[in-house]
Image (tube, rainbow, N blue to C red):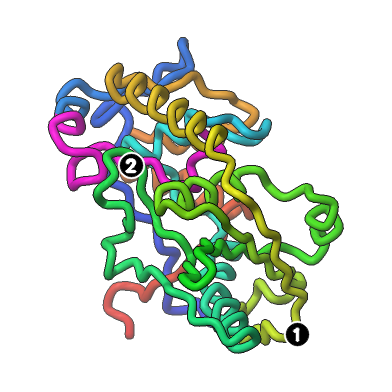
Amino acid sequence: MNVANKIIKIPQRFKYNNHEYKVDFVNKVVILDADYHSKLLANKPGSFGGFRKITGSALGDILKLSSLNSEFAAFARIAGFAMPILDRKYVDAGIALEPKIIEMIEKKYNFKIERFEAKKYNFDYFSNNELFGGLPDGYLEEQKLIIEIKTTGIKKLSAWNNNNINLAYIKQAQLYSYLMNVKRFTIVAAFLEDEDYIDPKNVDISKRFVKNWFFEVNEEQVLDDINKCKEWYYRYTKSGISPVWNESVDADLIEYLACSNYEEWEGLYLKWVESGKAIAEYENKEGSI
């Protein structure tokens, strides 16, 4: 890309240290500003101005399913100051290939899979649920089956075949299945080559290895997950104080939240771009076309 007439686009953010929250480096927590906290509590979870709802993808962090999961990051998301994605290649691959994978399944098996478009449901199919939200990837009515689509690297195929599937993926799909009163779900994974992440829109998914795994909803387990998430949510939203962070997992987020204004954030982001931690997007310079 020719960047001669372009500048690095700084990701938007509207909340800063010592404004909407305070970073407490002594106790390793973030404390919400009293006024900001009151406004969040005054609005229904998931509504404009309120705490965010818990989506299926947050279960891994809230339940600490692995050493890389972070309750601190989960709190930042529900409080409205999650860190932007620094490298979008994996997210963009999923967005580009998910509809192709569903279309391939429909064509191969002559299925009609119901999809849940974000705009139609305002990014939340479970709007009637007080705390849990999100969008399932697909639903096969004739089999009463929730479909969850994942894209991952071909190097992980052997792990998946040995049932080393990310537990967070399973719990996410299981939660959505339970909320829809569905007893079964399947996780469909497309295994990509490294070069696929460069231009995922042009990947021929029919030439990639795609496999699915079936699961039965474990009602006792999903109810336990729901109760633990509810307890976690009410504890931290009521107190307005985050869980204690872990420097080995949360270092970038801590640095992000420590910024007190746009200038500090701009400097930090440009440093991340220079070091390769962040992959920049570009926009036209003012006055250029």
Q: Relative to 91, is 226 above or below?
A: above
Q: Would residue 52 be counted in the magenta stretch?
A: yes
The local crowd at label 1, few if under 14, some if 14 to 19, many if 20 or more residues have their Cα within 10 Å, is few
The local crowd at label 2, few if under 14, some if 14 to 19, many if 20 or more residues have their Cα within 10 Å, is many
Q: How far apart in space, not on screen, are marks 1 and 2 (Cα)?
A: 38 Å
User: Residue 241 appears at what percent x and percent y?
Assistant: 35, 19
Q: Which mark is residue 53?
A: 2
Q: Residue at x 59, y 88 (%)?
A: 107
Q: Relative to 24, is 171 above or below?
A: below
Residue 66 image-quadrant placement: top right
Range of residues picked out in magenta = 39-62
Q: Residue at x 16, y 26 (%)?
A: 38
Amino acid carrying label 2: it is Lys
Q: Relative to 153, is 42 above or below?
A: above
User: Label 1 belongs to which residue?
Assistant: 207
Q: In this image, 174 relative to 34: left or right? A: right
The image quadrant where one finds the C terminus is bottom left
Amino acid carrying label 1: it is Lys
Q: In this image, 113 relative to 186: left or right? A: left
Q: In this image, 166 relative to 259: left or right? A: right
Q: Relative to 103, is 168 above or below?
A: above
Q: Would residue 235 be counted in the magenta stretch?
A: no
- Looking at the image, the residue that sits furthest to the top is 26
Secondary structure type for disc 1: helix
In depth, the one of 158 and 201 nearer the eye is: 158
Q: Is residue 92 visible?
A: yes
In depth, the one of 80 and 3 nearer the eye is: 80
The image quadrant where one finds the N terminus is bottom right
Q: Residue at x 55, y 49 (%)?
A: 272
